[in-house]
Amino acid sequence: MFWILNLVFSYTASLFFGVIFDVPKRLYNTVGFVGASGWMIYTLFYETFELHTIYSSFFGSLVLGILSHIMARVKKEPVILFMIPGIIPLVPGGLAFDATKNLVLLEFSKAINTMLEVTLIAGAIALGLLFADHFFKLILSDKYKLSRHRKP
């Protein structure tokens, strides 16, 4: 039941943020699928493999970025339409709220530790998307080089 609820809620969160960001209606299901896939990979690594949140966020955003590029090629749409709604489930908003709350309550040691974790998670998400982007740029440049060398 845990896995089904995670799948359903991450799908709906990505789908509704796709609606907010004005994604075309024909891409709603795809955007929801991409976001749910990233979150499910995060949950798999965090719950099953018991990796830290930072590493789990990296792998979730890496899969999210790769799927975003694949869906962008399949649907012939910009990658950003799939990436932005897809990272919404991965963003550590609750943790950032806790850091701000601790800062306001003058609990500086808790606030600093929590803010450091938020920064590392956000960096891991950005790094995962960056690796996926460069991975696809390498693949596309290799295809371009191969097609250029095949011509007589």
Image (spheres, helix red, strand yellow):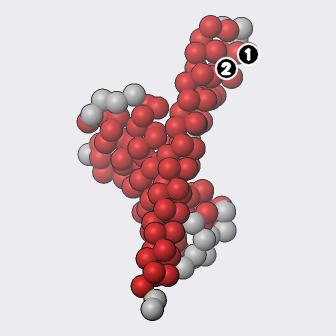
Q: Residue at x 36, y 47 (%)?
A: 41
Q: Which residue is mark 2?
A: 101
Q: Taking 136 as reference, is 58 above or below it?
A: above
Q: Position of residue 38 (x, y in %)?
A: 43, 51
Q: Of 132 and 142, which appears nearest the observer?
A: 142
Quadrant of the rendered image containing residue 85:
bottom right
The answer to whether residue 57 is left or right of residue 49 is right
Q: Taking 135 as reference, is 79 above or below it?
A: below
Q: Which quadrant would the N terminus be assigned to in this image?
A: top left
Q: Position of residue 28 (x, y in %)?
A: 52, 70
Q: Taking 17 as reference, is 52 above or below it?
A: above
Badge number at residue 33: none
Identify the residue at the far bottom of this view: 152
The answer to whether residue 27 is left or right of residue 43 is right
Q: Which residue is mark 1?
A: 104
* SS type, badge 1: helix
